[in-house]
Image: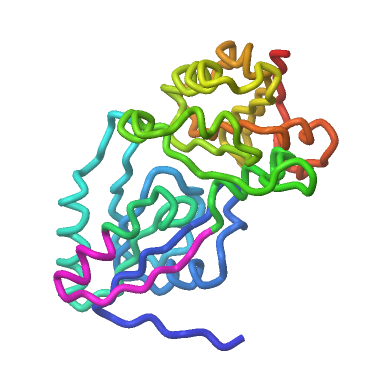
């Protein structure tokens, strides 16, 4: 297999996948092994850092709700500094850097500073969630597509709940753990059927994955783990969870609130 080399002075915005460490792409794995410096986020398999060379500088730059190890400005500054020092710099992110990973923001900041950038895609949590929980995002005759949405307050205020309530798509909400009840209430108030299936999937593909299933009208009883990342899925494809297989190595703790 022919591979591209990694160029000193370049920043590689790299998706590490999510859940199991073997879901990383070959290119991302090669990037870790070639790195002089890795700035890494919180939501990625920690085993991946063991693939780095002994002298690679590892810098934690993770952001969890209300707990930021460093500001975005400081992250950008460090990326620029290490690249200008002639290092192979890896910005390692859980999932895919271009899906709620601020990859676009960081790439623009680097380019503005004259630093070359390569974006290495990763397996997103929405893909891992769909596969490991047996909830397809699209399914002929059930869901014509899917929408990926943010659950943060600013984004929620701009959502058209009425439009979403009539959608034949699967709705996938990131960053919704602390606001899922607001989302559920908005969809019910906008007229979405109370029998619409809803799922909360935490630690998708990981050793402590849990799946909670409810109808929309009772979804306020879902109980997300405050210490685990998760996704909120709303749509008729959620009901296929009961029919489709899940990977054997994934913990399959399921709670029903029907």
Residue 69 lies within the magenta run: no
Does residue 78 appear left or right of residue 102 in this picture? Answer: left
Where residue 44 appears, as percent x and y from the top left, is: 47, 48
Quarter of the image that includes the C terminus: top right
In the image, 44: left or right of 234?
Answer: left
Q: Residue furthest right?
A: 243
Towards the viewer: 58 or 81: 81
Q: Is residue 195 visible?
A: yes
Q: Is residue 142 above or below residue 213?
A: below
Q: Residue furthest bottom?
A: 2
Please name whichever residue, 52 or 249, is drawn nearer the observer in this view of the structure: 249
Occupied quadrant, residue 79: bottom left
Q: Residue at x 61, y 50 (%)?
A: 127
**Residue 81: percent from left, percent from top:** 15, 66
Residue drawn at 82 percent across, 40 percent down: 244
Type of colouring: rainbow
**Residue sitting at 57 percent across and 46 percent down?**
126
Q: Which is nearer the eye, 34 or 252?
A: 252
**In the rendering, at what x and y percent does residue 166 appear?**
60, 32
Q: Residue at x 71, y 39 (%)?
A: 135
Q: Which residues are magenta?
A: 106-122
Displayed quadrant of residue 42: top left
Q: Is residue 29 above or below residue 245?
A: below
């Amino acid at each position: 297999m022919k591979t591209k080399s990694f160029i000193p002075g370049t920043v590689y915005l790299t998706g590490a996948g999510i859940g199991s460490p073997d879901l990383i792409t070959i290119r991302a794995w090669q990037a870790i092994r070639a790195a002089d410096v890795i700035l890494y986020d919180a939501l990625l398999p920690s085993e991946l850092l063991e693939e780095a060379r002994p002298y690679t500088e590892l810098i934690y730059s993770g952001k969890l709700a209300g707990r930021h190890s460093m500001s975005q400005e400081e992250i950008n500054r460090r990326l620029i500094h290490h690249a200008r020092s002639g290092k192979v710099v890896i910005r390692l992110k859980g999932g895919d850097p271009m899906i709620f990973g601020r990859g676009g923001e960081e790439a623009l900041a680097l380019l503005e500073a004259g630093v070359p950038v390569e974006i290495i895609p990763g397996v997103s949590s929405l893909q891992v969630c769909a596969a490991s929980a047996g909830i397809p995002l699209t399914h002929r005759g059930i869901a014509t597509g899917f929408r990926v949405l943010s659950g943060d307050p600013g984004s929620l205020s701009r959502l058209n709940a009425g439009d979403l309530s009539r959608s034949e798509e699967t709705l996938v909400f990131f960053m919704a753990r602390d606001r899922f009840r607001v989302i559920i209430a908005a969809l019910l108030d906008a007229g979405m059927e109370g029998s619409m299936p809803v799922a909360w999937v935490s630690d998708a593909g990981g050793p402590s994955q849990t799946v909670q299933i409810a109808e929309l009208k009772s979804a306020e009883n879902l109980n997300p783990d405050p210490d685990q990342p998760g996704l909120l899925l709303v749509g008729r494809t959620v009901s296929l969870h009961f029919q489709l297989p899940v990977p054997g190595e994934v913990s399959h703790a399921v709670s029903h609130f029907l």
